[in-house]
Image (cartoon, rainbow, N blue to C red):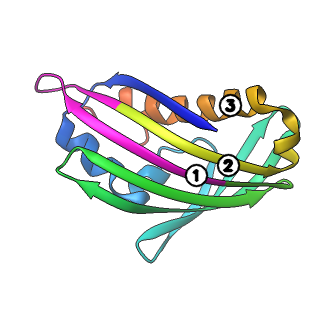
């Protein structure tokens, strides 16, 4: 499944890049995060997920696979829980929009297996888009310990 979108976020490009290139900082943005720990160049985390009949704890590994020119970051992740598995590759591009604002664009390839795969593509896509939206909203509004100045 392919997910794409963009949003204006209230922080300078350099600050957004610093957050997105660091899996530990990204972990703080993830809705339902229970715990995380550094593992090599990435993080291993426990996330509570609840959508439709898929509810439970997921164990997820997230690592940066590429960064480029202070404006592009790629992250790869995989995990499982509640009878479901997930693998994804997310690409983020950041473009400055004035001094204190940026445009964040994302493109993600997500593969889901197990119980969630039986839900149908539109329901899975809706859940994934909601999850991404919550992460982007955390960046937009400077939550999860990050300020917009």
Q: Nearer the viewer, residue 75 or 13?
A: 75
Q: Which residue is mark 1?
A: 88
Determine the secondary structure under disc 3: helix
Q: Nearer the viewer, residue 23 or 63?
A: 63
Provide residue 105's location: percent of width, then percent of height: 37, 31
Provide residue 76's location: percent of width, then percent of height: 50, 58
Provide residue 63's location: percent of width, then percent of height: 46, 63
- 10 Å crowding of disc 3: few (<14), some (14-19), many (20+): some
Magenta stretch encompasses residue 50: no
Point 38% across, 23% down: residue: 7
Q: Is residue 64 above or below residue 123?
A: below
Q: Nearer the viewer, residue 81 or 112?
A: 112
Q: Tag 1 or tag 2, which sits nearer the N-term?
A: 1
Q: Quadrant of the N terminus?
A: top right
Q: Quadrant of the C terminus?
A: top left
Point 55% across, 33% down: residue: 3
**Mark number displayed over residue 44:** none
Q: Are marks 2 and 1 in contact (CB under 8 Å)?
A: yes
Which quadrant of the figure has residue 130?
Answer: top right
Magenta span of residues: 87-104
Provide residue 138's location: percent of width, then percent of height: 44, 33
Q: Is residue 2 above or below residue 109?
A: above
- 10 Å crowding of disc 2: few (<14), some (14-19), many (20+): some
State whether the magenta stretch is mostly helix, strand or loop.
Answer: strand
Q: Which residue is mark 3?
A: 125
Point 73% across, 48% down: residue: 112
**Mark number displayed over residue 111:** 2
Q: Tag 1 or tag 3, which sits nearer the N-term?
A: 1
- 10 Å crowding of disc 1: few (<14), some (14-19), many (20+): some
């Amino acid at each position: 499944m392919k997910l794409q979108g963009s949003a204006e976020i209230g922080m300078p490009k350099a600050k957004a890049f610093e957050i997105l290139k660091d899996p530990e900082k990204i972990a703080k943005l993830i809705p339902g995060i229970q715990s995380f720990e550094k593992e090599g160049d990435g993080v291993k985390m426990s996330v509570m997920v609840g959508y439709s009949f898929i509810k439970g704890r997921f164990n997820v590994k997230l690592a940066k696979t590429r960064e480029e020119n202070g404006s592009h970051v790629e992250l790869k992740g995989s995990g499982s829980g509640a009878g479901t598995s997930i693998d994804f590759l997310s690409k983020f591009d950041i473009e400055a929009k004035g001094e204190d604002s940026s445009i964040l664009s994302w493109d993600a390839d997500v593969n889901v297996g197990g119980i969630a795969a039986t839900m149908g593509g539109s329901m899975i896509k809706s859940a994934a888009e909601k999850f991404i939206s919550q992460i982007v909203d955390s960046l937009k509004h400077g939550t999860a310990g990050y300020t917009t100045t």
